[in-house]
Amino acid sequence: TILSAIKSTVDPSTRVVFSVNPDSTVVENGKYDYAIVVVGEPPYAETFGDSLNLTIPAPGPSVIQTVCKKINCVVVLISGRPLVVEPYIGAMDALVAAWLPGTEGQGVADVLFGNYGFSGKLARTWFKSVDQLPMNVGDKHYDPLFPFGFGLTTKAKK
């Protein structure tokens, strides 16, 4: 899991706190330096993944709002497609689209902690709302949250 990968990546003296759905009391009393908030969709195939609203499943939105308003945070979004994140972007310090990493939680931790650089670029446009769909590069009203090819490139820490 991403949690076990984080625990194995950080210094052994680092306190890692996990909560499925942290409330404001946990957040305010924890004296955290930063938070890694992992939210997203469960794996799916075919019609089981159909969604007309493409929203982050609960409790993801409330966790983002609760944690990221109080603590510097990076949100790791686990999904098989772009989801509506625009309402939460202002609360986040960083967003990582990890797609569906399967058993590769260590790969997510490796880039979060700089052991490997980020190199991903969006293979599709990331919309602001589902009302914009379909949206493609070159459309008359092309106004994405993140355009086709958007992404961060970093180098691994030495």
Image: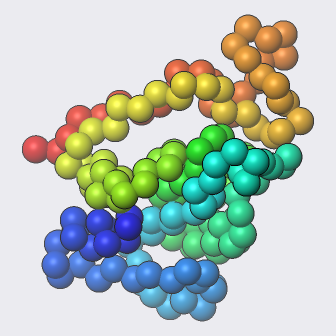
Residue 155 % position (x, y): 23, 35
Q: Is residue 105 visible?
A: yes
Q: Is residue 106 left or right of residue 3?
A: left
Q: Is residue 137 left or right of residue 27?
A: right
Q: Nearer the viewer, residue 42 or 110?
A: 42
Residue at the location (73% across, 8% down)? 138
Q: Is residue 52 left or right of residue 90?
A: right
Q: How many marks?
A: 0
For the N terminus, the quadrant is bottom left
Residue at the location (53% across, 28% down)? 122
Q: Is residue 92 visible?
A: no
Residue at the location (34% across, 38% down)? 118
In the orientation shown, which residue stands out farthest toward the front? 46
Residue 54 % position (x, y): 77, 48
Residue 70 % position (x, y): 57, 73
In the depicted structure, whether residue 13 falls above or below residue 64: below
In the orientation shown, which residue stands out farthest toward the right? 131
In the depicted structure, whether residue 145 falls above or below residue 134: below
Q: How did the renderer colour the structure?
A: rainbow
Residue 97 % position (x, y): 51, 45
Task: Using the rendered view, name the quadrant where residue 28 is placed.
Answer: bottom right
Q: Nearer the viewer, residue 97 or 94?
A: 97
